[in-house]
Each structure stands twice: as structure tokens, then as C-alpha cells.
Amino acid sequence: MLRLLFWIALIAAAVWLWRKLKAPVAPTQSPREQDAAPMVRCAHCGVHLPRDRALSLRQQWYCSQAHLEQGPGSSDR
């Protein structure tokens, strides 16, 4: 019985070691700032959102069609 447990442990260790050596090494670096999308501020409500999701009108950015139609919000923000 002890001999069987020894061989099972030895085979399990060999499989674990083989998988560890064959696995591709993934970089653990954090994403760079250049990969982040540029953010813009909604002229109506002030919410920040990615520029590719924003709507623009006369060099102002809006978060939705409703805010685009309402125009710029009050200037107290």
C-alpha cells in the first residue's frame, strides 16, 4: 500500500512539474497608460467617459443623445 502511494505521489509531482515548465509565461506587467482610452467630460452633466463613446458637437462632448439635444448644462459645476 505504501509503495502504491509513493508511485502516485511521484507521478503527480512529475505531471505538476511538466505542466509548470510547459505553461507559457504571462507577463505580470500592468497595462500602460498609453493603452487607456482618452477621457472627455460631458458638457451637460460633467460625467467623464471614453472619447470613442462620447458624442461631439461644436468641440463639446456629451454622454448621450439627450444631453446633446439639451446643450451645455449650468456653469456651477
Image (cartoon, rainbow, N blue to C red):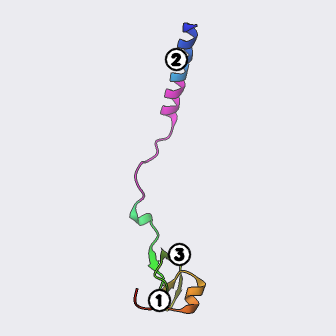
Label 2 CA crowd tier, 10 Å (few <14, some 14–19, many 20+): few
Residue designated by label 1: 59
The kind of residue tagged 3 is: Asp
Is residue 19 covered in magenta?
yes
Secondary structure type for disc 3: helix
Which quadrant would the C terminus be assigned to in this image?
A: bottom left
Question: What span is colored magenta in the figure?
Answer: 14-31
Q: Residue furthest front?
A: 76
Which quadrant would the N terminus be assigned to in this image?
A: top right
Viewer-proximal residue, 6 or 31?
Answer: 6
Check residue 52 in the rendering and tell me which mark sits there, or answer none. 3
Residue designated by label 2: 10
- Report whether 66 appears left or right of 58: right
Is residue 55 covered in magenta?
no
Viewer-proximal residue, 2 or 24?
Answer: 2
Q: Residue at x 47, y 88 (%)?
A: 60
The kind of residue tagged 2 is: Leu
Q: Position of residue 31 (x, y in %)?
A: 42, 58
Q: Is residue 22 above or below residue 1?
A: below
Label 3 CA crowd tier, 10 Å (few <14, some 14–19, many 20+): few
Q: Earlier in the sequence, mark 1 or mark 2?
A: 2
The kind of residue tagged 1 is: Gln
Q: Residue at x 47, y 89 (%)?
A: 59
Label 1 CA crowd tier, 10 Å (few <14, some 14–19, many 20+): few
How far apart marks 1 and 3 lie (CA) works out to 14 Å
How far apart marks 1 and 2 lie (CA) works out to 68 Å
Q: Position of residue 67 (x, y in %)?
A: 55, 86
How far apart marks 3 and 2 lie (CA) works out to 55 Å
Check residue 19 in the rendering and tell me which mark sits there, or answer none. none
